[in-house]
Image: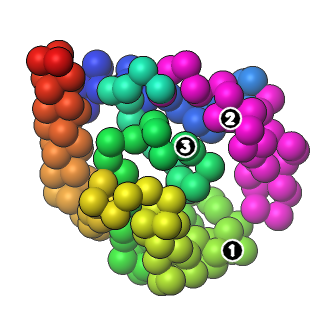
Amino acid sequence: MSESFKRMNPNILITVKEKGLHEGFDQEFQSYILDDDKVVDELEDIVSKGGNIVDYHSCDLFPERWFDLVLVLRTDITILYDRLEKRGYPQKKITENIDCEIFQVILEEAKESYANEIVIELQSNTIQDMESNASRIEQWVYNFKTQKNKH
């Protein structure tokens, strides 16, 4: 992805760690327990200006007003299992992620939190899928900025 594309993407997990926007660390899942209010407060000024990409594994904590488009990346559970195992995730965390994918938890969460017409589901199984998704996202961002500059 282009450098300008990367600069528009606030890294939620790094921000949480660096700024202490959490309520502690969950040893069992090997992840921070986010303080949703602190995270939203920290990102408000950046994200509310528009033209950003917020990449996170959940979406219901973010205000609807922030988004013009919500993308939910989906993956075949066998591929997902292998990816998470390679990352060294604990088995319980892998199982929870697989269950979420099977039951479409994030997709349903997105549809419940945002207008259905802005929620788009994309497959992310192969390198080709990922490259295609990145190209589509870059085009959507370009179109958004072009449209915004016209007004």
- 60 relative to 10, above or below: below
Mark nearer the N terminus (2 vs 3): 2
Q: Secondary structure at mark 3?
A: loop
| Image height of 142 relative to 136, above or below | above
Where residue 47 appears, x then y in whole percent?
48, 27
Q: Are marks 2 and 3 in contact (CB under 8 Å)?
A: no
Q: Specify the label residue 72 is tagged with.
A: none
- 146 to the left or right of 41: left
Q: Check disc 3 and report the residue beneath it.
A: 63
Q: Quadrant of the C terminus?
A: top left
Check the image and report above or below for 65 versus 9: below
In the rendered structure, find residue 91 and report the number of the disc placed on it. 1
Could you tell me which residue is drawn at 13 percent across and 23 percent down? 146
Residue 150, by quadrant, is: top left
Query: Residue 50's x, y, as percent?
Result: 37, 26
Q: Which residue is mark 2?
A: 39
User: What count of labels does the image hold?
Assistant: 3
Which residue is at a point 50% across and 59% down the rendered structure image? 113
Q: Nearer the observer, disc 1 or disc 2? A: 2
Crowdedness of circle 2 by 10 Å Cα count: few (<14), some, many (20+)? many
Q: Position of residue 69 (x, y in %)?
A: 32, 47
Going by the numbered disc 1, the residue's amino acid type is: Gln
Type of amino acid at the residue the image marks with label 3:
Pro
Query: In 3D space, how far apart are the residues under numbered discs 1 and 2 (Cα atoms)?
Result: 27 Å
For the magenta stretch, what is the residue range?
20-47
Residues at marks 3 and 1, CA–CA distance in whole angstroms: 32 Å
Question: Is residue 48 visible from the viewing direction of this image?
Answer: yes
